[in-house]
Amino acid sequence: MKATQLTSLIGLLCLAGSANAATVSVSASAPTVDNADIANDSGADDAGGDQGHMWSNRPHQGQSFTTSTNIGGYQLNAVTLKNRNNTSSSGPTFNVLIGTLSGSTFTQLGSTETGVAPSYSPNDYITFTLATPLTLSANTNYAFLWGSNGEGFVTANNLDDNTYTGGTGISSGDDNVPDLNNVIARNVDRVFHLDLVAIPEPSSVALLGLSGIAFLLRRRR
């Protein structure tokens, strides 16, 4: 077994030790942007090699992003990337990490989740739906990292990294093993979509509860 293959196998075993099973789905259309979603659908460029290609012998690829101002925070349900030009029917297993990003240091939140991909074709949007949604704080710099244990795809990118102003494309590690202390910022923005839902702040929930109780009391009178 080659050293690169051994490194990849060890990395996958480590990831599997704390993994949750996610769902991977494919669509020819971009996800709908609603609720508190963050998205960039501008770009069809190949960033090249280690900057944007995702296979078992490549780095994890991803994007940093900044949450908005909702005091209660947000629930992250799914992450989508666009496949630029690849066809696959082999069912690779993807793995996705979510975390905060400070400089080049990625601090992971929750578990590494894995999901088996269905077939996909050029220009498809590949969505990784988390088995366990994550709660994100407001006004915070986060990032996701996405890797593959086999076949992967070339991410679609915009080579002007100002198309999304809240972050930038990133890469980390090699051979499907991310290096969380050495995240590299790329001068690109991925085509990406984050399914986010704003969480009501506790005071708002309490007010809704009190309004419901008052309504019931009025009806009983």
Image: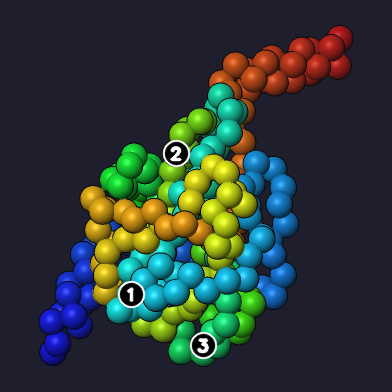
Q: How is the image coloured?
A: rainbow
Query: Residue 216 falls in which quadrant of the image?
Result: top right
Residue 147 percent across, percent down from the top left: 38, 69
| Foreground label between 3 and 1 | 1
Look at the picture and state if 2 lies above or below 99.
below
Give the class, few, some or many, for how many residues have Cα within 10 Å of label 2's Cα (few <14, many ≥20).
Answer: some
Cα–Cα gap, marks 2 and 1: 25 Å
Cα–Cα gap, marks 3 and 1: 17 Å
The residue lying at 54 percent from left, 81 percent from top is 118
Of 70 and 113, which appears nearest the observer? 70
Q: Is residue 48 visible?
A: yes
Q: Quickly name the residue at label 1.
A: 58
Q: Is residue 6 left or right of residue 117?
A: left
Of 219 and 101, which appears nearest the observer? 101
The amino acid sitting under disc 3 is Ser
The tag earlier along the polypeptide, 3 or 1, is 1
Q: Is residue 112 visible?
A: no
Q: Secondary structure at mark 2?
A: strand
The amino acid sitting under disc 2 is Asn
Q: Quickly name the residue at label 2.
A: 141
Give the class, few, some or many, for how many residues have Cα within 10 Å of label 1's Cα (few <14, many ≥20).
Answer: many
Residue 86 percent across, percent down from the top left: 54, 84
Say which quadrant the C terminus sits in: top right
The residue lying at 48 percent from left, 70 percent from top is 47
Q: Quickly name the residue at label 3.
A: 88
The tag earlier along the polypeptide, 2 or 1, is 1
The tag earlier along the polypeptide, 3 or 2, is 3
Query: Residue 40 falls in which quadrant of the image?
Result: bottom right
Give the class, few, some or many, for how many residues have Cα within 10 Å of label 3's Cα (few <14, many ≥20).
Answer: some
The amino acid sitting under disc 1 is Arg
Residue 136 percent across, percent down from the top left: 47, 38
